[in-house]
Image (cartoon, grey):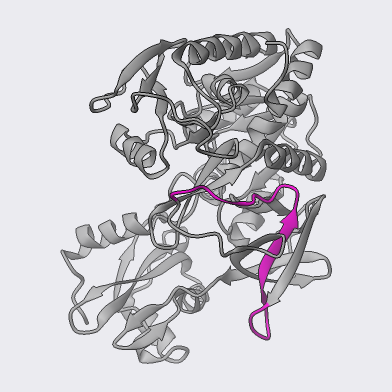
Amino acid sequence: MTAWRSVLVEHFARVKRDRSSDVAICALSEDRVLRFEEVWEDFLAFYRVLGTAGLRPGSAIVSLVGNSAAFVSTLLAVLEHGGIVIPVDTGSTAAEAIRLIDQFSADAAIAPAATRFSRPAGITPLPHNLALFRFRSSWSSGVHEGAVFKLTSGSVGAPKAVSSSEINLVADGNHIIEAMGIGPQDINLAMIPLSHSYGIGNLVVPLLLQGSTFVSRQSFAPHQLFDDVTRHRITVFPAVPFIFDYLRRHFSDRRFPSSLRLTVTAGASIQYETVAEFRRIFGLKIHSFYGTSETGGIAYDDSESIEHPLRVGRALPGTTITLRPWDASCGRVHVRGDAVAASYAPGSAEDDATFCEQGFLTGDLGYFVGDELVLAGRLPRFVNVAGRKVQPDEVERVLLEIPEIANVCVLGLPCDKRGEMLVAVIVPEQRQYVSPAAIRTYCSGRLSSHKIPRQYAFVDTLPVDSRGKTDLRAIESLFAQQLGVEPAES
């Protein structure tokens, strides 16, 4: 190669030159430790094979390598050819990958060689027990623009993909590095998916830009976490609220080593009690980080104080946050900056209407306390109960006032008599039980009767997806299992 096509490859070439023999990636699930020069050698090996296979600029490839040591080198190899990477969650099935290939007009997938795809057009072996699975007889050329398609859920339930350029990715990484004070000698614990915007911005890009090492596992391994942090002298631990809540509930007798200086939460809202209890138990403030797939990082709470309501902090460097009028208490968050993508990828479930005014209009509502942003919820998601619209967020806020309730999710399920009925999944506080009758009594003085949930399920923790967001489909299945095919009205 005589000239760099990829900006990220160019950055990583400098890092490799300066830190060739230092550890870059420690992939615990594979028992592999890679120095920077070895990551570079892997990149070159993947690059050569993809070139021989005929990969062309503008072609898209779905990546199923997950949190493996090969994530970085395969990403760089595709980008250096001018291709687009569509990274998907660890554990995604071949059938799910095929649906994405069809939806986004991708040409191929990089996956473990043992993956069973139905009738691929061709299979090319890759290093480290991976393979390139082709699904078209010839490569597309110039079909797509961008570098990475970040998958995120659409409001209609189907996937959408944010078309992020390398300029967007580099800007996001630099903003995060500056705001969080992440240096080249920091060691990140990588349990969040590298395939998500959070993992790309906080783990992958800092490694490529300045050599911030990460230690990875394919998924959250709670009983190994404390040993991992100690053995590998982890300094930065980005995670999602579920993980921090699990640790404070189940490992209050353990302690983190002094090497750990920064814990960061993103992906979903975190409860005030989780932050306060985590500080009390472990002596560490969980710093809130707010961002979206469309914008990259937006705001970061760098303070050591814990205030109610929790702030998500000040705007990241290079980022401007404004609030579009919504009601008297809050506004809809609009974001501008060089990390903000320009559009969704063709084939996404939604159009680009929210990419506006040289930025992105999120679905989040918030308000400022000084220069710090507080999130007040999402755009209303209504449940239609007998022709009357109910906002689940309103009901959840009332239920969380009950001392015995630590967390809750309210949603609507189909109901013959009412169209939809409200149901609630409740996480009791410290295993305290509160009866449905007591809940209804409490709500009756605070909510109209049609806003009071009709059925309840009690769980140790709310099911979450790999992004740390509440998994509404899993909750629907939970009700089917616990209460029958359809909950009966009381």
Residue at image position (79%, 26%) is 184
Q: Which residues are magenta?
A: 325-347
* Residue 139 position in % (x across, y down): 43, 25
Q: Nearer the viewer, residue 414 or 157?
A: 157
Tell me if residue 334 is in the magenta stretch.
Answer: yes
Q: Nearer the viewer, residue 488 or 98?
A: 98
Q: Nearer the viewer, residue 92 or 162?
A: 162
* Residue 417 position in % (x across, y down): 19, 84
Residue at image position (71%, 34%) is 260
Residue at image position (76%, 71%) is 368
Image-based side of 290 in relation to 425, left or right:
right
Check the picture and name the quadrant holding the C terminus: bottom left
**In this figure, what is the number of numbered marks?**
0
Is 387 drawn above or below residue 222 in the view shown? below
Image-based side of 402 in relation to 79, left or right:
left
Tell me if residue 331 is in the magenta stretch.
Answer: yes
Check the picture and name the quadrant holding the N terminus: top right
Residue 428 visible from this viewpoint: yes
* Residue 239 position in % (x across, y down): 59, 43
Instruction: Choose top left, top right, bottom left or bottom right for residue 470.
Output: bottom left
Image-based side of 151 in relation to 138, left or right:
right
Is 160 drawn above or below residue 189 in the view shown? below
Residue 237 visible from this viewpoint: no
Residue at image position (73%, 7%) is 21
* Residue 66 position in % (x across, y down): 47, 29
